[in-house]
Amino acid sequence: MIALIALICGLPEVLWLGGWNTACSAGSLGAGGGPFMDESSFGALENPAYACFAGTAADLTGSLVYVGEKRTRTVYDSFEGAVGESEQAFNQGIRLSPGGAAGTFALGRWGLAAGVRALGSFHYDYRRTARNESYVLVSEETLECRGTLWEAGASAGYSPAPGWSLGVGGGVVAGSRSMFWSRVYADPMQTDLRVEEKDDVAGAVVRASGETVLGRVRMAVGAALPIGWTVTGASGVGVDLEDALEVKLGVIYLPGNRLRSRFAAEASWRGEDDPGLRNTWGVRGGVENLLPGGPVTRFGFDYSTSPIHRSLDAVSFTAGLGFRVEGWDVDAGVRITPAGWRESLIPGLPGSTPGDSLAVETLTAGLVLGISRNFGEVPR
């Protein structure tokens, strides 16, 4: 039901895939948002081999997210000529979003990591006032969705030789998403519509990776596989989701210049088993500079494709700052994601009609704050 309502309202994939991924540290987000090459305790969960190189450390994050959305339709005259755009809805809001807490522990050639983190948020608000050609009120439509997808994970890495490591890990995934949708008609002769739905999401994920540090270059390769993901509604009937293998590659380069720069990049590919979804891929990268006597500055980008339709592909721009305060690292990262799509470009939406001109423009901006500390020398 929730997916059906989402399609009828012409919504992006946030309701069933989750949005605003906060599964990495604030420092990594500012430099492109790559969780796989994240040099923090969160990175050791995503890339188990990194647990050997992370030392003994602890990380904590949280975020503040702004979402703005404008919906317009093309207005036509009596001769079917386009005369302009009519705004149908303008929704915006700010919310606090949980991040996570993680830690690593160095034990000789072994490295261990454990933590809890938010993989995604189902938070979404939508309101629209529908009017006819004479600008008379027809109905008021409201959609409210809430929920967070969590993972409690752990990983272990082993270094058989200096600069080399292998790791395995995984986690238990659980969360819920609740939805309320209503359409209240101005005409008392029409029956108002109201739908309430709550789904529980549960499953697991396993990961494996390998990593090497050669001079000023750190390289890693890994894979993740969701297992047994199920969405259960109020009726108690569960729907199994298709397992989709994800492969990741990453590299970090330290040129050794006076700014103590750090270049990071990673790429991912996910093969979808569901014939109705597209295989997806993403690339992200960024740079970090430690200014002499000043803070750490970071810049980056993230390009990710959508499993639903190419018009939902998105690019994000990131920036961040980092400070050292009495042995603690305090970081702030910002990610801005503008997006736009037309309903007529996405075939098969139950709520659309031939030639429908609904256009949606969104802007998501998030501020992630993080605090971390390393309790010993980081091994390399």
Image (cartoon, rainbow, N blue to C red):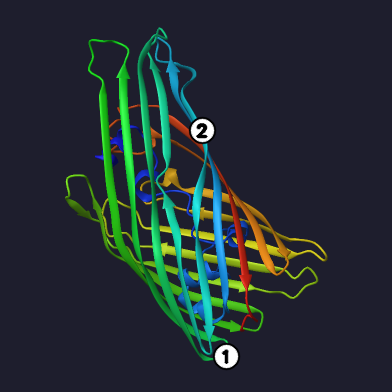
- Of badges 2 and 1, nearer the viewer stands 2
Depth check: 165 or 54 in front? 54
Percent across and percent down for residue 220 are: 51, 76
Query: Can the viewer see residue 36?
Result: no
Q: Amino acid at mark 2?
A: Gln
Tell me: 240 left or right of 377.
left
Query: Callout 1: helix, strand or loop?
Result: loop
Q: Position of residue 147 (x, y in %)?
A: 38, 46
Q: Earlier in the sequence, mark 2 or mark 1?
A: 2
Badge 1 local density, few (<14 within 10 Å), some, or many (20+)? few
Give the image location of residue 167, x and y in percent.
44, 80
Residue reaching furthest bottom?
Answer: 161
Q: Residue at x 40, y 46 (%)?
A: 122
Q: CA distance from mark 2 to mark 1?
A: 51 Å
Q: What amino acid is found at the position of numbered circle 1 in the picture?
A: Pro
Using the image, determine if residue 23 lies above or below residue 126: below
Residue at the spot 47% in from the left edge and 54% down from the top edge:
21
Toward which corner of the image does residue 344 lie, by quadrant? top left
Determine crowd level at label 2: few under 14, some 14-19, many 20+ residues with C-alpha closer than 10 A.
some
Q: Is residue 16 above or below residue 243?
A: above
Classify 56 as above or below 158: above
Q: Nearer the viewer, residue 14 or 235?
A: 235
Q: Which residue is identified by label 2?
A: 92
Locate residue 198, reporting x and y percent: 28, 43
Quarter holding residue 203:
bottom left
Q: Residue at 26%, 10% (x, y): give it.
A: 188
- Which quadrant of the view contains residue 295? bottom right
Q: Please, which residue is most extreme toward the top here?
A: 134
Q: Which mark is residue 162?
A: 1
Q: Residue at x 26, y 20 (%)?
A: 192
| Residue 25 is at least partly visible in this image | yes
